[in-house]
Amino acid sequence: MRKRAIVVNTSRGPVVDGSALVDALNSGHLASAALDVFEQEPPAVDSPLRKHPRLIISDHMAWYSEDSQMELQRKAALQASTVCTGRLPEAIANPEVLELLGRTSEWTPNHLTRWQRLRGAKLAQGS
C-alpha cells in the first residue's frame, strides 16, 4: 500500500488485521483509517483500535440509511417467502443442517456462506 494511504473497511472485519493496522498507523506508513467492522465484534474494551488518534471507528452502522433499511427488509421478506414455499434460501448460516434434511445437492454456497465458514474456522482456532 502506498505510504500515507487511508484505509477504510466497512465490508468484513477479517479483511483488516487490527494489530498490523495499529503498527502501520504508529509507524506513519498509513495516514489514517476508518473501521466499521472488526476482527472481533465488538473490539475489546482495552483494544488500541478504540483510542488511536488517527483511527475513526463506528459501531457496525456504516451500512445504515433509509434505503438500505428498506432493502434489508425486502430481502428478509423474500428469503422468508422462499423458505415458506419449500425452497432453500440464498445464504445458510448452518449448512450442515442440509445434510440432516438430505438436501445438500440442492444448494450451492454463496460468498457470504464461504466467509462465515472462514470466520468460524478462525474462531475455532482461537485467532
Image: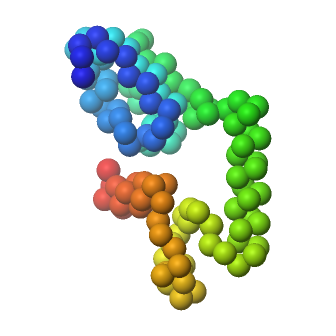
Question: Of residues 67 and 23, which is closer to you in this image?
Answer: 67
Residue 50 visible in the displayed image? no
Residue 122 drawn at (x, y percent): 34, 55
Residue 91 visible in the displayed image? yes
Q: Quadrant of residue 58?
A: top right
Q: How many marks?
A: 0
Q: Quadrant of the N terminus?
A: top left
In percent of the image, x 67 and y 32: which residue is there?
A: 64
Question: Of residues 22 and 79, which is closer to you in this image?
Answer: 79
In percent of the image, x 32 and y 36: which residue is there?
A: 17
Residue 33 drawn at (x, y percent): 41, 19
The coloring applied to the image is rainbow
Residue 92 drawn at (x, y percent): 56, 66
Residue 13 drawn at (x, y percent): 43, 40
> Does 9 sit above or below residue 32?
below
In percent of the image, x 70 and y 52: which residue is there?
A: 75
In percent of the image, x 31 and y 59: which residue is there?
A: 125
Q: Is residue 121 left or right of residue 100?
A: left
